[in-house]
Amino acid sequence: MGGGAAAEGEEEVPSAGPPPHSAGESELRQVAAHVDTLISSSYSIKSFPGKWQSIRNKLAKLSSGLAAAAAGGAASPGSGDVPALSELLQGINSTVDKAVALAGACADQSYAGGKLLMRSNLDLVASRLELHARSLEQVYASGVLTHARAIVLSKPGAGASRDDMRLYVKDLLSRVKVGGPGMAASALLALNEVLREDDKYVRVAAAETPELVGLLVGLLEAGDRVVQEEATEAVSVLAGFDSYRPSLVLAGAVAALIRVLENGTGSGKRRAAGALRKLTENADNAWSVSAHGGVTALLKLCGDPGSGGELVGSAGGVLRNLAGVGEIRRFMVEQGAVPVFVKLSGAKEEATAIQAMEFLQAIAGDDPNVKARVAREGGMESLLRALDPNTPSSSKAREVALRAVEALCFSPASSVSALIGAGFLGRVLFFLRHGETSVQESALKAASRLCAVSEATRRAMGDAGFVPELVGMLEAKSPEVRATAAEALSRMVSVQRNQKRLLQEEHGVDRLLQLLCQEDEEKTAMAAARKHLLSTLAAIADSSSGRRRIAASGYVSNLEKLAEADVAEAKKIIKKLSSNRFLNMLSAIWNS
């Protein structure tokens, strides 16, 4: 057939129009649209405005980069086959999907896992968006795309062989060492992911790159913030293993992490504090942190209103570890730790408040001067607020507050007087009557310790109504609780007015006698309870009304059994009873 005209009956081929989008360009435009949609929708979110503004800024930067890439023809036909670009677009899409889900949760104010977790997730998204923007810039501006046809290894699946894991880690570490900031950050992000997921990768990484620790510690000083953040995260992961802590310290990680605390990004500071918290679980590393100015840097972060709860939690955790060393503890006090943590003990974020209360106990120890300083800074008032029944504090917070009051305010006598004057007794009574089991037990321990302070305190407790509550606690299921209640009662009845109150309880004496011979698997607690019960009975047997109540009880035989078993205190009580005219028969037996 001639080539000049179409054959008769043959359909004419239409003329060519504009070429269709390539697969790579289509994917790029879809991702860009996804980013722009999130930017628009994020303006309606009212929760965490600062966090979402930061995310919007990073989304805008990313959107600009995607638009420039498309306009510059970076997504020309065939570029969809470039592994680096395709992988980056998939990563961006995944992060934006995560951000969309978080946006929905923030819009509904449905914070599964709490606000702290939501803040952490928002920070993570912001960090990843920044990383994507830098990676995109690296791909299109530094020539990486030209060489991107080199193989990019996929992450091995679950149950992968050691060889596959080794090859993947080797590839990532090569990118960290020879790549630009964008490539290094991407590789570190991927490395951190596998290090967190499977401990085997930690061992593989160390075996594959003996200089791994030195490499990561060196990157803590990186000028690129994202590289620094991801290197800090990797160091934090390694710090979770006892075997790597010595090498991290020897490589200079402590000093470098403290510099990140002082000059890094918010995310970098959180990760650095987390790494130091792990490193200082080994007390030998405490001096290294202090020597490099860590105490001052950590206290500054804890006292900064701009520090988030997660950062304060990690920084406070480091300081708590350091407080185990006496000289460092005294240095903390000199540097102003007490007012910082008294303020934090009243924080709205309960985890922060709990940590602060525990830290104040640790830093005060047995030092009366530090305890007095806690009181001067308003520590007592802060702790009592946590014990206010009208506040929404959790059981955990109330237990910690009770222990803190006991540790910090039960001496000297002036502190106890101030404590009672501030309404502490009423709050302890409330939790003895209405508290959950764990809080009730903490309140009982505090009451028992308070009984031992002074006679004036015992009188005040009797006037407040503690005797009936302590008698009631003798029926608790827990043998330890019964023993603690018995101990408190034995102290309370050293005051005569409290003896009368005990005798006024309808079944008070019966309960004391009944418990004398109660069998329990907890032999130690049972023996302690019996000792205190006998002490209480001996005190009330000093009065004729007390002897009459004991003699009239249907459980007096329990006392007789102990006397027959040659229990000295029981025999003394029986001898007191024998002088009572209602027990002439017993008198004849025990005086024979």
Image (tube, rainbow, N blue to C red):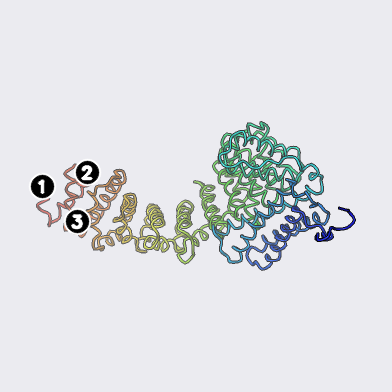
Horizontal and vertical percent for residue 319?
58, 46
**Mark 2 and mark 1 residues within 8 Å of each other at the beta carbon:** no
- Residue at left offset 75%, top offset 46%: 82
Identify residue type, mark 2. Answer: Ala
Mark 2 or 1, nearer chain start: 2
The residue lying toward the viewer, choosing from 289 and 219, is: 219
Mark 1 or 3, nearer chain start: 3
Which residue matches tag 3?
550
Q: Secondary structure at mark 1?
A: helix
Horizontal and vertical percent for residue 344?
57, 56
Mark 3 or 2, nearer chain start: 3
Horizontal and vertical percent for residue 50?
68, 62
Identify residue type, mark 3. Answer: Ile
The residue lying toward the viewer, choosing from 469 and 545, is: 469
Q: Quadrant of residue 16?
A: bottom right
Can residue 378 be seen from the camera position used here?
Answer: no
Q: Secondary structure at mark 2?
A: helix
Which residue matches tag 2?
568
560 left or right of 344 in image: left
Which residue matches tag 1?
589
Identify residue type, mark 1. Answer: Ile
Q: Residues within 10 Å of mark 1 (few under 14, many from 20)?
A: few
Q: CA distance from mark 3 to mark 2?
A: 17 Å
Q: CA distance from mark 1 to mark 3?
A: 18 Å
